[in-house]
Amino acid sequence: MSIENQAVLYSAVPPTERQRARLEDFILRRHGSPLPLKWRAADMPRGFRLELGQEVYDWTPEGQLRQLENCIDQALDEGEAPGLPLLWDTVRAFQPSPFMEETGEVLYAGDEIARVGGLPDAQYGEILDFNGPVTGLVLDLREDSLGCVLFGAVEHVTQGSLVRRTGRTASVPVGFQFLGRAVDALGRPIDGKGPIAHDAWYPIERDAPAILDRQGVKTPLETGVLCVDSLFPIGRGQRELIVGDRQTGKTSLALDAILNQKGKRVICIYAAIGQKTGSVARLAAELEVRGALDYTIIVSAGAGCPASEQYIAPFAATAMGEYFMHLGRDVLIVYDDLSKHAVAYRTLSLLLDRSPGREAYPGDVFYLHSRLLERSARLSEALGGGSITALPIVETQAGDVSAYIPTNLISITDGQIYLDSGLFYAGQRPAVDLGLSVSRVGGDAQSRAMKKSTGSLRLELAQFREMEVFTRFSSDLDAATRARLRSGTLLMRLLRQKQGRPLSRAAQVALLTAAQGHVLDELEPGQVESYAAALAAAVEQRLPALCRKLRRSGELSEEGREKLLRLARDLAQEARRGTV
């Protein structure tokens, strides 16, 4: 007789005739037909466990404790403001009852994954409970088994171990108390500042907002980087990819974007995936020194963390961001970087014996990143108008943007900022390639003042880059060509900006107005960077009313433009005299 057609009772002593009759009646009501009941001795001083095939009814103290734990978890998930009163009410109202558990058995365990037999009703993304302080996330469904990635002390999971369904999806704690803290991929603090209270639990996997639940990207999210905000503007709810080789300033660009949100009520989340612990610690220290850690959450799954944690880290960061978005707040998330995230997913997929595709990545790696990044959006006003703006980072090899993961992400996002190693080593920093970079939102995400001040800057720079290539092979140039090359060189110098010094909107408008008014033509190329720094500081000091108007409305009147031009020309004269 198969195990599905019999009932097994585990207890310390055999049941009495009366107990057996009650159990057989329970089996009849639950199963719909009578089943033979077998008794097996077990080390259970109190209570018993009844198994009906894959169904388990645990009436031991441990089983009742799990029932209470599930009730508390459900109360925390549903409660608007969980706390001691809610927990106390849950405990007082708890009544243990015959609770069915679906159980399976570990067929194989090792290398952070486990294959489980049984549990035919388990779903993709469900959390399974292994004996001991270990949980598993279902990532592979087959007819005869499940594939899980493990979290916790995986050495406790061995072949033959019992596995239970929880019916829950993977979730992380969320709340305002996480601001200023560094946590791991499961939401546990790693900064040594003590435990973190939470407001709710959010699933790490959630459907992206529907089209009718979104609104257009039209509000700027300024990074403080002149070449980005003027030429490739980013709007709230946009997904702008930062792509480039190793050590070309990708993280520095994202860090400037975080620093520039100070005082703008934008919550920032930095998801470090596969990064060195020292690098993340230095970034956290920089944010703290600059006063930016107060509105930032750091979610870190470092290079030494298991691939399972690196896999869920960006999803956990997005869940934390969605909590604030649903409250009507604006969120900026930096994923640093998704190429390492794809490698972690490839590792888990190969361990789960999933069929490899191009470059050994599984066939659903595109879906992996699309379902992550599609959750970044600006919600409609009816849903609060909150937003998540995503700055995913991807690393290229030898500038090859046609590689598998970069092309996937380029097709998913709303534009890309390409950082060129040649420009970087030539001293052009940030090393933004103006030809390969693009924003598919464009001027819709710019203030009117920025749009007006930018003018034909991008066209002039494109013409300069093209002319520069052709004139490398010629030494005899006419005066007009030399003037055009000199003007383009001055503009490129203007776009140079030191890391960690984001510019305000007023400073950017002043610099662009000076360029549009050909004030830079009065300078030598070596004077441009010091002149730009002086003008950015002077506009805040000498024209405070104009700066306030630009911050508040984003409008620049003709009178304001004339004031900026006069200030720019005065500083240019000082620069020529060597006093700047």
Image (cartoon, grey):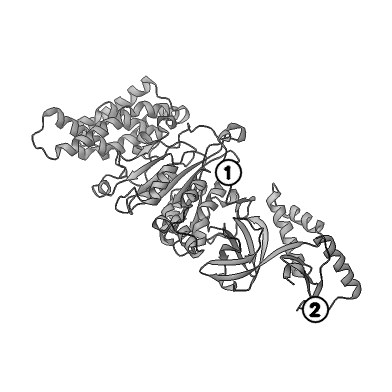
Disc assigned to residue 249? none
Q: Is residue 256 visible?
A: no
Task: In the displayed orientation, state which residue is furthest to the front.
Answer: 1
Given residues 202 and 357, the one toward you in this image is: 357
Disc assigned to residue 12? 2
Given residues 240 and 40, the one toward you in this image is: 40
Task: In the displayed orientation, state which residue is furthest to the right.
Answer: 18
Compared to residue 232, the image places residue 7 above or below, namely below
Crowding near the residue tagged with mark 1, few <14, some 14–19, many ≥20 C-alpha atoms within 10 Å: many
Work out which quarter of the rendered image holds the C terminus and state it: top left
The amino acid on which the numbered mark 1 sits, given as a three-letter code, is Phe
Q: Determine the secondary structure under disc 2.
A: loop
Work out which quarter of the rendered image holds the N terminus and state it: bottom right
Task: In the displayed orientation, state which residue is furthest to the left.
Answer: 476
- Sequence-first tag of 2 and 1: 2
Disc assigned to residue 324? 1
The amino acid on which the numbered mark 2 sits, given as a three-letter code, is Ala
| Residue 293 in picture, x, y percent from top left | 49, 50
| Residue 17 in picture, x, y percent from top left | 90, 74
Q: Determine the secondary structure under disc 1.
A: helix
Question: In the figure, is residue 247 to the left or right of 112?
Answer: left
Residue at horizontal 59 percent and vertical 45 percent from the top: 323
